Image (cartoon, rainbow, N blue to C red):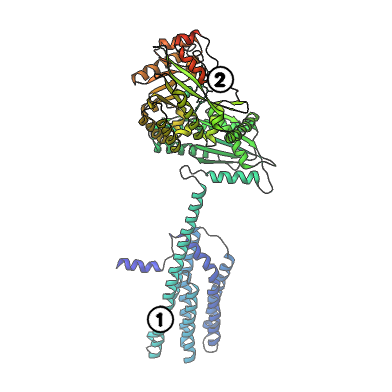
Amino acid sequence: MLTHLRAFADLYSVPINDRALAQAQVKEMARRMPLVYLITCISAAGLSFTHYDVAPVWLTLALPLILVLACIARLRYWLMDKGRIYTHRAAIARLRASVRLGSVLGFAFVIWCLSLYRYGDAVLHTYIAFFIVVTVVGVVCCLLYLRAAALAVATSVLVPFFGHYLLTQEAVHFAMAVNTIVVVSAVVYVMLTYYNDFSQLISSNVKTAKLSDENLKLANHDSLTGLPNRRVFFDVLKRWVEGEQNHTPVTVGLLDIDGFKPINDVYGHIVGDQLLMEIGRRLCDFTSDRLTVARLGGDEFGFLATPALSDEDAHALGEKIGNAIADPIQLAASCVRVTASIGIISGGGDSAEANQLFEKADHALYFAKQNQRGRIVMFSEEHENAIRQRSFVETELKNADLDKELTLAFQPIYDQETGRISAVEALARWSRDGVQFTPDVFICQAERCGIMGKLTSVLLRKALRAARAWPSDVGLSFNLSAADIGSHQTMAHITDLVLRSRFPAERITFEITETSIVQDFGRAEAALSKLKELGSNIAMDDFGTGFSSLSYLQRLPFDRVKLDRSFVSEIENDDKTRRIVRSIVRLAHELDISVVAEGIETEGQRRLLLDMDCQLLQGFLLSRPITGADLLKHFRGSTLDAALALDAPKSATTINT
Ligand code: C2E
Ligand code: CA
Ligand code: CA
């Protein structure tokens, strides 16, 4: 019962909780209310006119004049308010006032009409009924959009009307009243269904608008950090740099979080996400009218400043951003500190292209990642030259006859204990039209243009063929790049080559750097287990230069570590390095992992390593990388003593490009 009463009362109330509906109603009311008052005034004038001769003046002039003036005042009010924007509170107040006024005026009008009933003949009586019915139907139709007002007017008019006609106790009047009620009920019913459709339309409009807002947000924003995404970044960059009229100079900055991947690997993706969210929040603080910050993907972010900043200002901005990121970050699991490498270029103007600017900033970032982690690198002329050189190497590589032009140099690894060559590392050499390119340059370029797999196949085939001629206790060490272990196809090819060669897989050690593992731990793990299945060994190359060498040592099946040259070169002068190396050697032995010290150039280094129990040595002191033929000669006097006594054979000549 109570719920029915409440539902009934609701019919007469305005929608306080539905902002969109209230706004739509107030807008519709502003359009229709003048019409309501106009209908009422004209009908009232007609009724006054027809009763002027038979009824007293106060009923045909004074009272209707007051009512009509009230209507005109309201009509003016609505007309003046057309186009006004309402707050929700104002809209609700307005609607409520309309409901109240509607019932008061409706009641006043009907009482006036019924007061005229005492005067005039049957025709005039019928006219009164006609006036009331037609006016109320007209008004209800105009108030379709505000159910409460339509019902209030209908009720305030029809209840007295019905009561009056019943009281006359005339059959015709009773029939008229019933007829009126039926007609008005039908109109009200139509009004109610129309009103429902109207409110549903408004709510579905709201939902559609909300959805399209969300879609727009999804398309343009990164869902994790809430920052604009790569697409927006490029749109803004293109708009500024390549815009129709204005080729605005702009500063492009790209930043990459150092060591993010190991954190993601070690602590898991949830922690990684938290870290990115916090970094996104910190970067967001830099956003302004002149600075757009975006997440470009993974742990890479970008910023665009316009007008372009001077190099000093851009550097200062990079430093501020770097400092903000370097502040400790409290995550659920622990507190971490990360740095960002940043590459920046300021440029633009007449002929610049957005993509070129981006690539240059990317080059500066790459340079920072390789050489100055955690620092800001401004794109310079040197970088411009490097890009030119890179594209030269790329073109040459694509046109190269790899079978013919790729060769190998071999550098022995000596066993201190036996004094003999324990293994030989194969090092790639590429010579084209008399120009020799160093592996540091062409391997990285081959990786970039996606042809590393081809190079590895040629090199491995050549290495396996050469190694077949070596003494049976000498192993082959072969370098694999990140692109190799990241490619199923290359890994399958490597396995195939090893199986088809007549060289025992157990005598091969594949050397892998930590950076290759970092790029995709899952794939690296799969690649390594494939090599282990073959029966080969795996060495972690350049051990100690990365972030998580130890963590990878624990998680992946390494047989050997190759202590990076940077440790060996410091070992004579720095006590701390000595202690680190001693600990690494001890730890590796504990784990049953052999240690090769690379880059030994002095006798002092050799002796120190010997003291530390480091058994396997490699370096210019013992032998530079040499040709296959020289190596075979070398095997004849391959003891360590011989290597030290003789002048180390000359390396295959290389030109640093
Ligand atoms: P890496 O694997 O660490 O190889 C050792 C590098 O150090 C070689 O340079 C070698 O010539 C040099 N080296 C050896 N002993 C000494 C020393 O006593 N002092 C100094 N200063 N340097 C020494 P290289 O041949 O120029 O190779 C550079 C890098 O290129 C290699 O570093 C390796 O990462 C990559 N690389 C070489 N060959 C291949 C290959 O066939 N495949 C792949 N994926 N990478 C290769
Ligand atoms: Ca190596
Ligand atoms: Ca190395």
Residue found at x 54% / y 46%: 231
* Residue 396 shows up from this direction: yes
Position of 607 relative to 165 (above/below): above
Q: Amino acid at mark 2?
A: Ala
- The residue pinned by badge 1 equals 181
The mark closer to the camera, 1 or 2, is 2
* Residue 545 showing in the rendered view: no
Please state which of residues 644 and 240 is positioned toward the viewer in this rendering.
644
Residue kind at label 1, given as amino acid type = Ile
Residues 253 and 178: in front is 253
Residue labelled with disc 2: 652
* Quarter occupied by the N terminus: bottom left
Name the spot of residue 174 as percent of width and height, x first. 38, 87
Q: Would you call the spot at circle 2 few (<14 residues within 10 Å), some (14-19), or many (20 or more)?
A: some
Estimate the x, y position of residue 322 in percent, counting from the top left. Answer: 53, 31
235 w.r.t. 81: above or below: above
> Is label 1 in contact with label 2 (beta carbons under 8 Å)?
no
Give the left or right position of residue 221, taking residue 308 as reference. left
* Residue found 56% across the figure and 30% down from its top: 404
- Secondary structure, mark 1, is helix
Decide which of 186, 583 is in the foreground and name it: 583
- Say which label, 1 or 2, has the lower sequence index: 1
Disc 1 versus disc 2: distance between alpha carbons? 110 Å
- Quarter of the image for the C terminus: give it: top right
